[in-house]
Amino acid sequence: MTPAERKSLIATYKAGYDEVVRALAGIGPEERDWRPAPGEWSAREVVHHLADSETVSGVRLRRLLIEDNPVLQGYDEAEYARHFRYQERPWEPALRAFEAARATTVQLLESMTDADWRRTGTHSESGPYSTEKWLRIYADHGIVHAEQIRKNRAGWAARSR
């Protein structure tokens, strides 16, 4: 990965929180909890997922940076949603957690050295894992979920017609 590619991916990562906030602007209580289909997430559940995913991913990056060849554990996001009652809990603290975790991780990403970008470990589910792979995976995660929220909102609006 070139320095220019890194810079672009970091900018995309940094933009993720603001994209989610824009996608949520003006959302109503019923719309927030509407699911487009059984087994799909509501906007509220997406926000909780982002908070938990950002927390887990931030720890993964930090472990890659300070541990020699760490083993990074996968997790079951559907089980997180069920067990941590995403659909029942207020989303405001989760949105703040997503914002804070992302902001502190951006600070790390922007200060990483060439040696930091060569750090590696192993993911329990996907095998070899590096800081560069981490960035490729998480750069657009917030933006992907912002689009999911927008699609949910479009589905909600179409349902109401």
Image (spheres, helix red, strand yellow):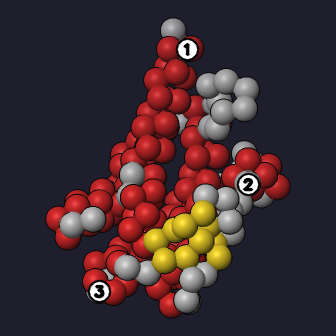
First in sequence: mark 2 or mark 3? 2
Name which residue lies at 61% across and 58% down.
126
Q: Can residue 44 be seen in this view?
A: yes
User: Does residue 139 sit above or below 71 in this rendering?
Assistant: above
Residue at image position (38%, 68%) is 132
Mark 2 vs mark 1: in front = 2
> The N terminus is located in which quarter?
bottom left
Which residue is outermost to the left?
4
Alpha carbon separation for disc pair 1 and 3:
51 Å
Tag 3 residue: 113
Q: How crowded is mark 2: few (under 14 residues within 10 Å), some or many (20 or more)?
A: few
What residue would you read off at disc 1? 160
First in residue order: circle 2 vs circle 1 = 2
The image position of residue 71, as x and y in percent, is: 65, 76
Picture quadrant of residue 123: bottom right
Query: With 102 as the anchor, is 82 left or right in this view?
Result: right
3D distance between C-alphas at marks 2 and 1: 33 Å
Which dot, 2 or 3, sits closer to the camera? 3
Query: What residue is disc 2 on?
Result: 76
